Image (tube, grey):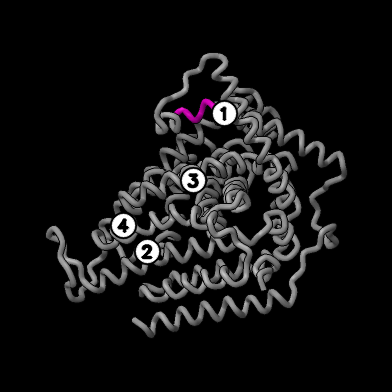
Amino acid sequence: MLKSWKLKEVVLMSLFAVVFGIVYLLFVHAANIWAAVIGPLAYEWMFGIWFIVSIICMYIIRKPGAAFMSETMAAAIEVLIGNAMGPRLILSGVIQGLGAEAAFALTGYKHFNILVLMLAGIGSAVFSFIYGYFISGYAALDPSFVALMFTIRVLSGAIIAGIGGKYIGDALLATGSLRGYAIARAKKGDVNA
Amino acid sequence: MRNLLHDMNPSVKFILITLSMLAIAFFFNPWTPFLFWVSIILLQLTMSRTKWKLWLLFMLPFSIGAFGYLWTTVVFGADTGGTVIWSFAGLDVTDEQWARALSLAFRVMAFSTLSLLFAFTTDPVKFILSLMQQLKLSPKLAYGVMVGYQFLPVMKDEFIQIQQAQRLRGAKMQKHSWQRLLSMRQVLIPMLAGAVRKAERSAFAMEARGFTGEPRSAFYRPIRIGRIDILMSGVFLVILFVSCAGGSWLS
């Protein structure tokens, strides 16, 4: 899978993972304090933030694996920085990344419009919810409460990760620093270059 | 004795911790996560050189989170039956529900402790090297992550620089922390643009020095699996087994 990747694309993912790893950690701490007040629901509405790096990286690099690897890398960087979530973050990163990747794979890595990006956010939300259902024991909660959590998470994935990811990607493209990446080539109408 | 957890192979430790978490997630009685939590603390007390003050500081937000889990599970718990042990504001709490709530809260505590054990006893660079050597992570990815990791302090400086530059030009600082959170993109976009340029430069430098990213078999800093790892795997598995069996038996 990595054969067709240029080193600069791998390093780009890694540096994005660093920036977002820090952002993710900030939000983990904010969410933990929230969680004491309103319970697990606190995490749900901001869940989309934790999916955003996979969508931004895929939007820029447009190669199979970009969503999965960047999310996993961000999780790995969070672990390297040293935090209390530890290795289990890597596992949730892998799962969230796979969710976004699945959405891009479904569209054959050909379209990167807003709908596909939102679908990727939803993919991450669904995958991470299934994993969370198991690991955090949502089975012990009332089904209607679980349904509410699920709905909020899907919305958050679509809006924060999908729309927010596209917004950041476009803003970054406007700075002109992305020349030499697939996103800039696609803008010129030369998709397959 | 105090070096055992530090000297373990990071990949082995990583796999053991992940396995334990997945196993514990199957249990909904309060005793299993509780026993596991206590044993992990004991393990870290006896076999590591942890700075406990820092540990407590890290643990604090998770204790708060665990409390959140406790009360939501009591209030929004699934109907499980059982006898009512106390009522509060028109809310009946059954013993089953209480047991489940305790179980989930202890699970949060157990997982955080387990994660802290890893964080406090693992050298990040060794962890990446070990992932590459034992778990066959592609060197392209492994060194890519390491580049990112080494850029951390640079990123921190850059963050401060961008903020200062913006203030110099008269950009207003938001007063409330939530407003600052929303105006994050002011700093985020320049940071990311800088990251793109750094990525290009460092990738170019790596390739200029002959880095190909091909899988390899010889390493400059070999990380090995030794007798300690077999011993510690045994210890972890015993703890896991005792908490699972003991927890089921006690409840």
Is residue B62 shown left or right of residue A190?
A: left
Q: Is residue B74 visible?
A: yes
Residue at the far top in the pictured view:
B169
| SS for callout 4 | helix
Residue at the limit of the structure toward the front, as seen here: B53
Check if mark 2 and mark 4 are on a common chain.
Answer: no
State the mark number for residue B105: 2
- Badge 2 and badge 3 in a common chain: no
Residue to which mark 3 is pinned: A50
Q: Amino acid at mark 4?
A: Val
Q: Is residue B103 left or right of residue A96?
A: left
| Disc 2: CA contacts within 10 A as few (<14), some (14-19) or many (>=20) | many
Instruction: Find residue B219 and report its horizontal and vertical position in percent.
Output: 83, 59
* Picture quarter with the N terminus of chain B: bottom right
Q: In this rendering, does residue A185 appear at all?
A: no
Q: CA distance from mark 4 to mark 3?
A: 20 Å
- Chain label for disc 4: A
